[in-house]
Amino acid sequence: MPDNKRRTLLQFGLISGLIGGLAATSLAPQLAMAEETPINVGALRFTSHAASFVAFERGYFAEEGLNVTFKFFQAAQPMAVAVASGDVDYAVTAISGGLISLAEKGAAKVIGGALLEEQGIDGQKILVSDAAFKAGITKPAMLDGKTWATTQAGSSFHYMGAKIAAAEGVTLRFKPLQKVGAIIGAVKSGQVDSWSIVPHIAKPLDKGGAVHIIGNVADYIPDYQVTVVFTSADNASNKREPTEAFLRAFSKGADDFNAALVDKTAGDDAAEEMVKLIHKYVYTDRPYEKAAPSIRNGAMRISPDAAINTASIQDQLDWFKAEKLVKQSITFDTLVDSSYVKK
């Protein structure tokens, strides 16, 4: 083969290789975006967890390349353990002593805010059993010496009860019952005198007559950051892209929920659609007609953009430390990865 023809073929081959390489490079991001990242999301079957349900049902997780599977729990601390062990990737629940201790061990990090007590929005209620109510316990100041239900020592129920007791100058006897379902049964039967819980559970119990609402948690803990978004410390540090993707999708779900049921700016049809969506996860054992009022009653604010009320988180941390439920050396930064947080 003549040299000039050989040079032409070599040049053509080089150019073809470059074009092929450029084509492959240009396709790479598209192929990467097409791949789904499987994640497990921890949740409770509460209206307050609706942002995750909305993000799943409306495809916001899928749009971010996340293939979500829900894992359901009945208390906060087991969920924190599941995140630390890697059984769950992201979760939403209240801050507990268990979560703080896991953060101290380098196993978990709070990355955002979720449920929030807000002035003007109906929030968590303080309840007493019918027996306690008939005995004259009609307001929180009368709870001295009475029992208060918690899931575990160091749960959010423990924190709320202690803050209410301190404000009223009364003493409560805390009774851990492990699961919300067990607490409901104990309060209804009079085995426990008092408790606090989100409105979508509190109001139906009050309406049934076996339990009575005697106050609001917000009167004692204003602007309380009730629940947070958290993940493993490894995810927070080393898997930033899916973590940010999760928060974006979660925030879209929160926006839809707030517009439909909290601010009520999306219209009646949107509100009805939202309640039907949530009913797939909450009060699934009830027909829609009976479940819908309770779901609407539970419409507390979910933090826009997963923002955190840092003052509330610090107050909770200070209480846990004062009660010697966690180590004194733990700081806000031990618990929270502030690089994700909007305040």
Image: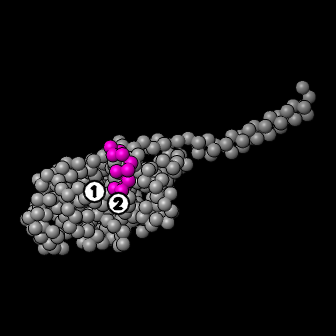
Circle 2 crowding by C-alpha within 10 Å: few under 14, some 14–19, many from 20: many
Element carrying mark 1: helix
The residue shown at (52%, 48%) is 59
Q: CA distance from mark 1 to mark 2?
A: 9 Å
Q: Position of residue 268 (x, y in %)?
A: 49, 60
- Provide the residue span drawn in magenta: 284-295
Q: Position of residue 48 (x, y in %)?
A: 36, 57
The residue shown at (15%, 59%) is 129
Q: Position of residue 294 (x, y in %)?
A: 34, 56
| Residue on which the image places disc 1 | 204
Horizontal side, residue 278 vs residue 209: left or right: right
Quadrant location, the C terminus: bottom left
| Residue on which the image places disc 2 | 297
Magenta includes 321? no
For the residue marked with disc 2, what is the amino acid?
Answer: Asn
Quadrant location, the N terminus: top right
Q: Quadrant of residue 209?
A: bottom left
> What kind of secondary structure does the magenta stretch mostly adopt?
helix
Query: Which one is earlier in the sequence, the residue at label 1 or at label 2?
Result: 1
Q: Nearer the viewer, residue 18 or 247?
A: 247
Magenta includes 294? yes
